[in-house]
Amino acid sequence: MDSNIVVRALSALAHESRLAIFRMLVVAGPEGMAAGEIAQQVGLSPSSLSFHLKDLSHADLVKPQQQGRFIIYTANFDAMTGLIGFLTENCCAGATCAASALPDCCGDAP
């Protein structure tokens, strides 16, 4: 993973509101959430939400999709797992450790 992309993603997540939005979209899963619902749950004005979603989109952490009159935002799970992989690829100098189980966290858990 390119270090510029990593820096952009970490920078986007380094804000309380953007982190809350991203975590909420991770919980929402592939169905995502409409912008209005995100604003209501996080407690942001539409203009503030738009600013934060633009930053997360620019970092490729969220993806917008037009569905009728609404824009549905979803977490970019490929980018998230790539970022986690980048941060943990040299963990414990290659020895088995707790971080080695992370790729299984988003799998087909019951």
Image (cartoon, rainbow, N blue to C red):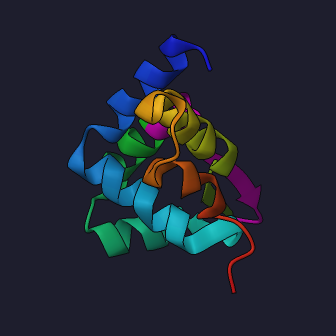
Q: Is residue 80 visible?
A: yes
Spot occupied by residue 62 in the image (x, y as percentages of width and height)? 57, 46
Q: Residue at x 61, y 45 (%)?
A: 81
User: Relative to 74, is 87 above or below?
Assistant: above
Residue 23 in the figure: left or right of residue 29: left
Q: Quadrant of residue 73?
A: bottom right
Residue 53 location, x and y as percent? Answer: 45, 45
Q: Which residue is found at the position 33% from the left and 51% from the top?
A: 19
Q: Residue at x 46, y 49 (%)?
A: 97
User: Where residue 45 sits in the image (x, y, percent)?
Assistant: 28, 58
Between residues 81 and 71, which one lies in front from this camera angle? Answer: 81
Quarter of the image with the N terminus in it: top right
In the image, farthest residue toward the front? 95
Q: Residue 27 or 52: which is nearer the viewer? A: 27
Q: Is residue 25 left or right of residue 69?
A: left
Please indicate, yes or no, whether residue 102 appears anywhere in the rendered image: no
Q: Which residues are magenta?
A: 56-69
- In the rendered view, tell whether residue 103 sits above or below residue 28: above
67 drawn magenta:
yes
Verify whether residue 64 appears in magenta. yes
- Classify the position of the C terminus by image quarter: bottom right
Q: Is residue 10 above or below residue 65?
A: above
Q: Quadrant of residue 82?
A: top right
Numbered disc total:
0
Instruction: Report the side of 71 relative to 26 (left or right).
Output: right
Q: Residue at x 35, y 73 (%)?
A: 40
